[in-house]
Image (cartoon, rainbow, N blue to C red):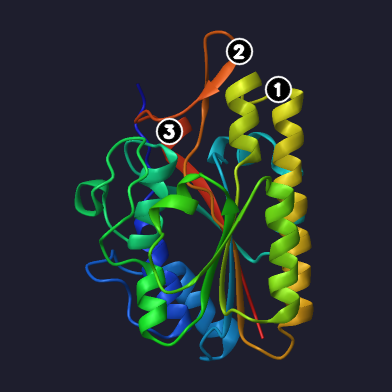
Amino acid sequence: MNKAINSLRITQTAATVAALMGFEAPKNADAPNPVVTHAAQKALNGRKVERALLYNPDAIALWLFQKYTHLFTPVIENTAITLPVLSVMPSVTPVCFASMYSGLQPADHGIQAYVKPVLTCDTLFDAAIRAGHKPIIISTEGDSISEIFKQRPMEYIFCATPEECNRHALEVLEKDSHDLIVVYNGNYDTQMHRTGTESAEAIAELCKNAADFERLTAAAHAAWAGKACLAAFLPDHGCHDIDGGLGSHGLDMPEDMEIVHFYSLWK
């Protein structure tokens, strides 16, 4: 089995966002992503990000971007930085998002299987709250992001469907009531498990993710005019096909471990 080779790490995400917004990273977090922080200095002329939109589509693999690049056009057109990123093992949703938002490896944050305990380690959300920011998580009820980051003094909106999540996200953006907005959409992951990673149904969900990111980013531009801003498209892990025409993930293989992250910075 081939090994994943991406040098940038999903564990760098938390410290990257913290550095861009000008507050201390979560305790013991991995270092910031130097590509993004260097680009931010040029794009923002040294200003710190005042508003951040972090869009988390589930299971969008690097190989999907490589094979179906044209389907990512709405994401490409609304971002300036496209980076190959290495996820963590086991490459399953709660483990990966715990690493993304704590900056820690699974052995350190404590989630090492498909379980959804509330994290007790320091996270991006804890660090943001300490610095006086107002984070919000908008996710489908019962999914990993809805569970593992609970019990913080922040706002959560849990919904029945990804479409409902995105409607609420547009409302939050319009009100400009929060400065760190995390939106989770698990529709591609759900569909590829049912019908395979490249089925027509799964590809349609991938296209929805791209279109929804474009729509949310447009709303962020309108709501946050004049502010220094960040929008990012940040999947958690990849995927591969198994017998029976089903999609899966969780292995230490490039299809599951190599993902693609996109960043946009503007003022």
- Please say whether residue 56 is visible from this viewpoint: no
Q: How many marks?
A: 3
Marks 2 and 3 sit apart, C-alpha to C-alpha, by 19 Å
Residue type at mark 2 is: Gly
| Residue in front for this viewpoint, 261 or 208 | 208
**78 lies above or below 51:** above
Marks 3 and 1 sit apart, C-alpha to C-alpha, by 20 Å
- Give the mark toward the camera: 3 or 1: 1
- Tell me whether circle 1 and circle 2 mark residues in contact (CB < 8 Å): yes
Residue type at mark 3 is: Pro
Residue 155 in picture, x, y percent from top left: 53, 70
Label 3 Cα crowd, 10 Å radius (few <14 / some 14-19 / many 20+): many
Q: Earlier in the sequence, mark 3 or mark 1?
A: 1
| Residue in front for this viewpoint, 257 or 25 | 25
**238 lies above or below 161:** above
Residue type at mark 1 is: Ser
Marks 1 and 2 sit apart, C-alpha to C-alpha, by 9 Å
Q: Which residue is mark 1?
A: 199
Secondary structure of residue under mark 1: loop
**79 lies above or below 61:** below
Q: Which residue is mark 2?
A: 245
Residue 36 in picture, x, y percent from top left: 48, 70
